[in-house]
Each structure stands twice: as C-alpha cells, then as structure tokens.
Amino acid sequence: MRYLYYMLALLLLWGFSSCAKRTELVAVDAGSIKVEASSREDGAEAVRAIVERGRMAVDSIKRPVIGEAAMTLEKHIPESPLMNFAADALLLMAREVTGENVDIAITNKGGLRSNISAGTITFGDIYNVFPFENTLALLTLKGEQLMQLCNEIASVGGEAIAGMRLVITPQGDLVSVTVAGQPVDMERDYRVATSDYLSQGNDKMTALALGTARVVRNDITIRDLMVRYIKALAAKGEPLSAECDGRITVKR
C-alpha cells in the first residue's frame, strides 16, 4: 500500500499518453509522497461508501415487480419455453412499436443468460436474462436468403424463432421450413425482427447481414420489449407462460 499513489500516478500518466498523439512519459518522482495508515483507512472507507451507494441504486432499479410467471422458463435446444417466450414477445412487440407487418422474429439462445423462475418477476430477473444493450432491428430477406438463415439455425441445433417452423436432423441439416403455415417463396420478401447484434451477421447467422430495408431502433432495447410484453400480460391479469409447440422439430 505504500506505493498506492505512485501506482495511481503511473496509471494516470499512461492513460494520458494513450489518448494524446504527442505525449511521452519522461519521469515520475514520488519521493515526496507520504501515505499514512489513517489515509489508507479513510480511502478504504470512502470506496466502501461509493460501492454501497452504487449497490443501493442498482437494487432500486432491479427491485420493481413487473409481472408473474406461471412456470419456470428454461433454455434448451432445439426449442424451449424461454426461447419461445423471447421470440414470441419480440415478434408481437416489434409489430406493435413499429406498426410494420413483421413476419418472423429471431433471437439467439446464447443471448439468454438466465432462466425465469416461477412466481414474481422483477425487472432484475429480466435484466439477468437480457443483460446486453442490444436494440431492435428490422430487415428484409428474400426467400432464398431466409432459407440460408434457416440452414444456419439448423446447423447449431436451433435458435429462438417465432413466425416460422423448422424440421431439422440431429446432424444439423435442414429438412423443411414453413412461414405462417406456407412453404418459403424464394421470390418473396420476408420482414424479420431481430437484434442489432444479430442483424450484422453475428453468432453464425450470416444471412441476416444480407438483409435490406434496415431499420435499427437504438432507442428500444430487446430487454425493453420483454418488459413491455410482461407488463401487458400483467395488466390483463395474465401470468407469463410458454411451452414447446413444435416450432423446431428434430426428425430422427
């Protein structure tokens, strides 16, 4: 601890040098710095106070109740209650907030970071599931591009989807796809709701990067949409529930 201020000085000087084009560290003279035990204790107490204030502020944000879950929603492939809830909510809320006729919604299972337990749902619970600041993105895929995307989804064993149904093999091959009960029309345009992150072709969904007529709503996070969806259910006196309905089937 004797060299605390000395190290802080070095870090500050390093930070300045990394931000300025013509800054160069010449020397550091810490010979006149004296650190007393009382100074260390006062500093530690100040840090603890800052941490406590931060914890209280975060708790106040995460604590509010937004709804109820009728069941525990878990994640597993090829589909699961948690994945289906996320995709269904994304599809419905994307239509509502944009007014567009969205055909399909897709989000990635890797972005769902926690289960939702049965019982009271707080904002903190949803934050745990959706901790990233991903925002709503809309794009258009031709039927051929949509088929490429479905092949990519099949290759990883399934993702969170709504508005279409897939049949895949255990080896990750795509057998068939239907959208709203109809086979994919290779010449048709399909409007897709997803996250800004996935819209760039990330997480092995490269076909999404081919989309046109892009709209990215940086003012609306995916987490915002989930909260709105659950609050809308609560306003009607309905708990959150979801089930596996065969939207992704593995053909043995």
Image (cartoon, rainbow, N blue to C red):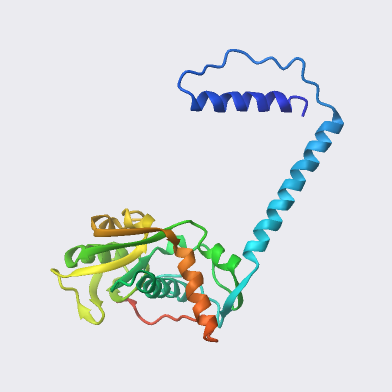
Q: Is residue 133 left or right of residue 121?
A: left
Q: Position of residue 62 (x, y in %)?
A: 62, 64
Residue found at x 17% / y 65%: 144
* 110, 105: nearer the viewer: 105
Residue found at x 31% / y 76%: 163
Q: Position of residue 206 (x, y in %)?
A: 28, 55
Residue 75 shows up from this direction: no
Q: Position of residue 129 (x, y in %)?
A: 52, 65
In the image, residue 7 sits, relative to residue 178, either above or below, namely above
Displayed quadrant of residue 15: top right
In the image, residue 143 sits, relative to residue 236, either above or below, namely above
* 95, 119: nearer the viewer: 95
Residue 169 shows up from this direction: yes
Q: Is residue 134 left or right of residue 122?
A: left
Q: Is residue 52 left or right of residue 15?
A: right
- Please count the marks in the image: 0
Displayed quadrant of residue 4: top right
